[in-house]
Amino acid sequence: MSDPKTIIEAVDAIRSGKISAGELVTASLDRINQWEPHIHAFLELFNDTAVQQAKDIDGADNTTEQPLAGIPISIKDIICTSIGHTTAGSKILQNFRSPYDATVIMRLRRAGAIIIGKTNQDEFAMGASNEFSAYGPAYNPWDTSRVTGGSSGGSAASVASREVFASLGTDTGGSVRQPASFCSVVGLKPTYGRVSRFGIIAYASSLDQVGPFARTVKDCALVFATIAGQDPLDATTTPHPLGRYTEVCGQDITGLKIGLPKEYFSDQVNAQVSATVKTAVKQLEKLGATVKEISLPLTQFAVPTYYVIVKSEASTNLAKYDGLRYGQLAVEATSLLEQYLVGRGKYFGPEVKRSILMGTYTLSSGYIDAWYKQASKVRTLIRNEFAELFKEVDVIAGPVSPETAFPVGQKVDDPLAMYLADMLTDPASVAGLPAISVPCGFASVANATGNNVPIQLPVGLQLIAPHFAEEHLFQVAHAYEQSTDWHKQMPALPA
Ligand code: GLN
């Protein structure tokens, strides 16, 4: 049996009869059995349906029209699937079963992908560590005493540990890119409006996007090509033509202009992370890109702008979890008001409650002008600042995160520190721009367990492009990846 490392290899191996979809699924389930006790990437597994789907693919006459035929993929639990539960990492949705598949799931199924299970996440995608999951955190495969990042931590961990070939997550302010960076896999946040959100449980409607995780840039492009495009069921998707996402992987980057914002290398960013990313940028120069230093002075306002907007929108999106329309009923409540208080009090976790409190305040009469509307204006300024710079450069490069994966427990009681974890991912989110995280090396960090042997933790290079220019991201990221071997390095299964 061959051992394909990427989706592209696996699809070839299935088509040429070197491996069956059934064998691929069995191998995936075996890895899951080995890794899950250490990383808790999954909240639910679909072993039986996955095996059945693989049988169907192996029995089909021809799968050449299906670009992902037989490929095991995991799905963040905020994405509705007609099989199993969809909890969004929350107790309030513990028993929720979606009556339908999200559009992205329908598209994956049509492409022949095998949905292996649902992945762990911060509750309602609020968080940057996966520690706000109501079902316990996921752990980083590179060091299980550390966080995976979040909120799509389970998705990133499932790809990094090679349990699956790819995963779908969602990114509102960094939730695909930051865990991808912490776990050394590729992760894309598409342009706002590029991927359907029909069937995605909303966190903040002006920011949420579904994004793929994969082991390589080309695999990521392939999954993205499958899910991208207009959807009549989501009015925020646009008719903008799709790009040649996989074809650009392999194109030369000579002459491409890359901007390096000095604010992304400030002293708030760990020195080793900065140095690792700068080395990656040197590599892009060697590959023919021209690099110039630029400035994005409004970067410092991205976190406050993002958090006012995200929490305001979250507070309205979460109003429907009242036990009557959605969410668990508090059986002990004796009145409607008590139902709201007891049910929401009992089944929402701390970050969700914080969001509702903050968001209700920033939207309330007398305060909405000073907060939500003001933040919306700053958002326009940030967007314009990017637009101006994109007249001079094709792509902006910097770190994804100011640090490497932090120890479990370090920030969980310090909301501000947790929010600052997305200081370098919020800008692109607020501006609606596409951005990718690609593995670019390892930084040496003191061992959290206290012995003196430093450990090596992954660092991600972030590339940001103009609206709908995902092609640029794939082209540059692929050229970089293929000139290094970071994507071939894998975490070792803990003893
Ligand atoms: N950490 C950010 C937040 O909690 C981003 C999360 C996300 O992208 N879903 O809002």
Image (cartoon, grey):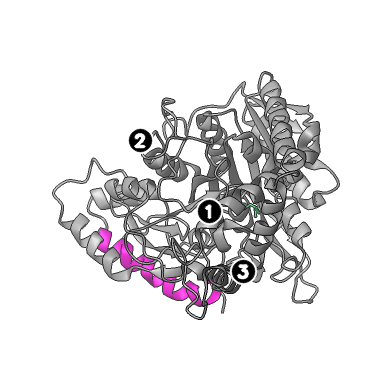
Q: Nearer the viewer, mark 1 or mark 2?
A: 2
- The amino acid pointed to by label 1 is Lys
| Secondary-structure class at tag 3 | loop
Q: Nearer the viewer, mark 3 or mark 1?
A: 3
Q: Residues within 10 Å of mark 3 (few under 14, many from 20)?
A: many
Residue 77 visible, this orientation: yes
Q: Is residue 346 above or below residue 180?
A: below
- The Cα atoms of the two marked residues, 1 and 2, are separated by 39 Å
Q: Residues within 10 Å of mark 2 (few under 14, many from 20)?
A: few
Q: Earlier in the sequence, mark 1 or mark 2?
A: 2
Magenta stretch: dominant secondary structure: helix
Please provide percent x and percent y for residue 60.
15, 52
- The Cα atoms of the two marked residues, 3 and 2, are separated by 34 Å
Q: Earlier in the sequence, mark 3 or mark 2?
A: 2
Please provide percent x and percent y for residue 352.
62, 62
What residue is drawn where x is 41% and y is 45%?
A: 198
In the rendered structure, which segment of residues is drawn in magenta? Answer: 21-40
Q: Earlier in the sequence, mark 3 or mark 1?
A: 3
Give the residue furthest to the front.
335
Q: Nearer the viewer, residue 440 or 131?
A: 131
Which quarter of the image is occupied by the N terminus? bottom left
- The amino acid pointed to by label 2 is Pro
Instruction: Answer left or right for 210 relative to 150.
Output: left
User: Where does label 2 land, which residue?
Assistant: 232
Please provide percent x and percent y for residue 58.
19, 57
- The amino acid pointed to by label 3 is Gly
Residue 41 visible, this orientation: no
**Are dots 1 and 2 in contact, CB under 8 Å?**
no
What residue is drawn where x is 34% and y is 68%?
A: 46
What residue is drawn where x is 52% and y is 63%?
A: 154
